[in-house]
Amino acid sequence: MVWVLLLRVASAAPKCDDPSAHLDEARVALLEGRKADANAAMDKVVAALSCSPPPTDALLAQLWVIEGFRLDVVDQDEFGVRAAFRSAARLDGSVWFDALGPNYRAIYDEARTDLQGGPPSTLHLLQLDEQLLPRLNSQDVPFPATVDPGLHLLQVTDRRQTVHARMLMVPPGADYDIDLSEVSPAPTTWSTMNRPLLAAGGASVVVGGIAALLSRGFEDDIQDAETVEELNDAYQRQQTLVYSGIGLMGIGAAGIGASFYF
């Protein structure tokens, strides 16, 4: 087994940014020759993807185009830029930035003539927590996964939110191990919805229970009724309280359950 080349890796941050905004920052920084700023912006993109929903094919293709541009400008990586452009074209061949100029467009068009880019590779995930699910390029795929060479986005979710992301450059024709031993589910936190739902649910259960208890007070009225009309009236009031109490307790239980979901 060989270790896959990690370009960037991030775990969920407390505040989740818009990855496309940082991608624009990286593009502008590269066009202006600010290499350090471009690298920092790309790190922010991956950090944002570590807590964002799976990106669309179009956004992912934009990311691969800009990463290819960065690989050439910053790292002078001729293999990397072609692999990145090929990866972008596989996802969405309509994505391009005219500001990159005709030379890069020619490299992109050449890469599009061979979308596979060599023999496929296999990705293996090591030590993945059983509570976590992997996504590759926004898709739920079984692992080990057979993939084309080039760039791939691995995101890990704990079934509630994305908790980890990493950008992978996969060379052709080999097996790769990806160690996820340090990735864990996000800690359970109380959101702005939790406390109101729990409070409302608890109050409904209490009020419902009181209503159900009060309904027993009508048993004497039922026993003491002297006419059919009085009997029906007492019975109807008792049933109203009983069913209201049961309904409130059911709503309360649902609210308490929802507080743990949100």
Image (cartoon, rainbow, N blue to C red):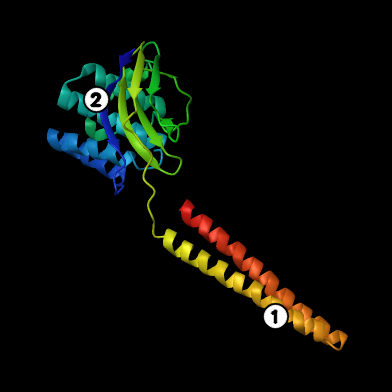
Which image quarter: residue 84?
top left
The quadrant of the image that shows the N terminus is: top left
Q: Nearer the viewer, residue 196 or 35?
A: 196
Q: Secondary structure at mark 2?
A: helix
Which image quarter: residue 51?
top left
Describe residue 231's horizontal placement relative to residue 111 as left or right.
right
Q: Residue at the location (52% across, 64% down)?
A: 201
On the question of residue 96 being in view, the answer is no
Which image quarter: residue 152?
top left
Q: Secondary structure at mark 1?
A: helix
**What residue sits right under mark 1 in the picture?**
217
Q: Is residue 208 above or below residue 177?
A: below
Q: Residue at the location (25% across, 26% down)?
A: 7
Crowd tier of the residue under label 2, counting other residues whose Cα lies within 10 Å: few below 14, some 14–19, many 20 or above: many
Label 2 vs label 1: CA separation?
Answer: 84 Å
Describe residue 38's horizontal placement relative to residue 244 as left or right.
left
Amino acid type for the residue under numbered disc 2: Tyr
Q: Nearer the viewer, residue 238 or 167?
A: 238
Residue 109 screen position, x and y as percent: 32, 21
Q: Is residue 57 above or below residue 174?
A: below
Q: Which mark is residue 104?
A: 2
